[in-house]
Amino acid sequence: MLKTGTKAPNFSLSDQNGDIHTLTEYRGKKVILYFYPKDNTAGCTKQACGFGERYPLFQEKGAVVIGVSKDSVKSHKNFETKYSLPFTLLSDPELDTIKAYDVWKEKKNYGKTYMGILRTTYLIDEDGVIIKAMDKVKASDNPQQMLEFLD
């Protein structure tokens, strides 16, 4: 996980509509950049819907929400449509940004060890500096926690 006070790595990734986004285009706004394992899984759906329900509150505070996983653009589009998600989902199948943000980790589940995305959320300030970093976040609590950090 990257530490607070460090410059957030820039990225150039496709969203659920195939449009390219970079971190630098969000200068002047706070960015909640959250990394999650997989579209349409229980925890990831709770987290995404939590951010979606609170999205107007994030906007009031001058923040944008961006979700990142290694799922395809098509998968993200289906996820967005199914749950009416009002924010950007970025696709990183090559793992470039996922690795740059140090969230590609060894995981264990039911006795099996594998590599995957460790659920992690970063709050990035208007100048592109990480001001809050949370790993091993609880999917259902994360959106409210991030809203409180903005106060």
Image (cartoon, grey):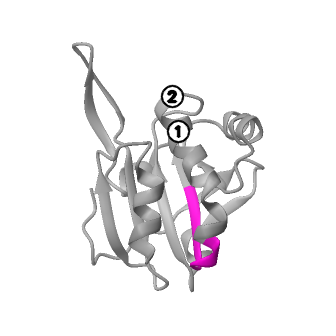
In this rendering, would 55 be left or right of 118? right
In this view, 56 is above or below 131: above
Magenta region, residue range: 59-66
The CA distance from mark 2 to mark 1 is 6 Å
Q: Is residue 44 visible?
A: yes
Is there CB contact under 8 Å for labels 2 and 1?
yes
In this rendering, would 147 be left or right of 131? right
- Judged from this view, the residue extending furthest toward the top is 111
Front-most of residues 100 and 77: 77
Percent x, y of residue 9 = 42, 68
In this view, 138 is above or below 115: below
Percent x, y of residue 74 = 73, 35
Q: Residue at x 53, y 49 (%)?
A: 68
Is 86 inside the magenta-drawn segment? no
Q: Secondary structure at mark 2?
A: helix
- Judged from this view, the residue extending furthest toward the left is 111
In this view, 122 is above or below 73: below
Residue at which label 1 appears: 46
Is 60 inside the magenta-drawn segment? yes
The total number of labels drawn is 2
Quadrant where the N terminus is found in the figure: bottom left
Percent x, y of residue 110 = 26, 13
Q: Quick one: label 2, few (<14), some, or many (20+) residues within 10 Å?
A: few
Q: Secondary structure at mark 1?
A: helix
Front-most of residues 15 and 139: 139
Q: Is residue 70 visible?
A: no
Residue at which label 2 appears: 42
Q: Residue at x 40, y 56 (%)?
A: 121
Residue 120 is marked as none
The residue type indicated by label 2 comes to Ala
